[in-house]
Image (cartoon, rainbow, N blue to C red):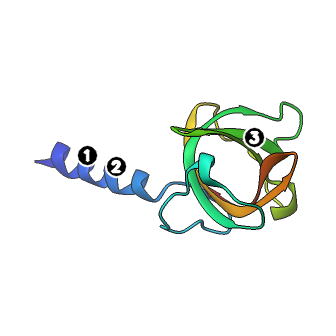
């Protein structure tokens, strides 16, 4: 009985995750393949690569594609977020060449 209660509590604690910057909320995820310039977006995927020096950017992969995410303007870094973590990130899409998501917040 005690083991069941501990397992339930552990699951609830993980559901919230750790938030960096502003909480991205529970908005439906925008697929990487459908981004438009100057669009606010919430994306969920895997952080498979990150800035090795300062953690000020990372690459996000979802089922539809890949996008670079910049965290510098939001005032947080992803140095402590393990590579291959599932993340939800919210921000604004900028397009000048390759699309870029300028993050305002992240949950992992």
Q: Residues at badges 1 and 2 in contact (C-beta under 8 Å)? A: yes
What's the CA distance linking mark 1 and mark 2? Answer: 5 Å
Image depth: mark 1 or mark 3 in front: 3
* Residue at the image point whose x is 32% and y is 50% from the top: 11
Q: Mark 3 points at which residue?
A: 58
Q: In this view, does 35 lie to the left or right of 101?
A: left
Q: Name the residue under label 2.
A: 10
Q: Is residue 81 left or right of residue 86?
A: right
**Where, by quadrant of the figure, is residue 37 drawn?**
bottom right
Residue 87 makes an appearance in the image: no
Residue 85 makes an appearance in the image: yes
**Where, by quadrant of the figure, is residue 13 drawn?**
bottom left
Q: Is residue 43 above or below residue 79?
A: below
Q: In this view, does 8 lie above or below 64?
A: below
Q: Residue 7 carries which label?
A: 1
Give residue 92's position: percent from left, percent from top: 74, 64
Of the two numbered discs 1 and 3 on the same chain, state the one appearing first in sequence.
1
């Amino acid at each position: 009985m005690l083991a069941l209660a501990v397992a339930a509590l552990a699951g609830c604690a993980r559901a919230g995750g750790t938030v960096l910057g502003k909480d991205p909320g529970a908005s439906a995820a925008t697929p990487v393949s459908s981004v438009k310039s100057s669009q606010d977006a919430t994306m969920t995927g895997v952080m498979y690569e990150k800035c090795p020096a300062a953690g000020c950017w990372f690459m996000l992969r979802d089922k539809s594609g890949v996008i670079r995410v910049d965290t510098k303007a939001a005032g947080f870094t992803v140095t402590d977020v393990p590579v291959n973590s599932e993340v939800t990130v919210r921000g604004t899409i900028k397009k000048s060449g390759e699309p870029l998501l300028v993050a305002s917040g992240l949950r992992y």
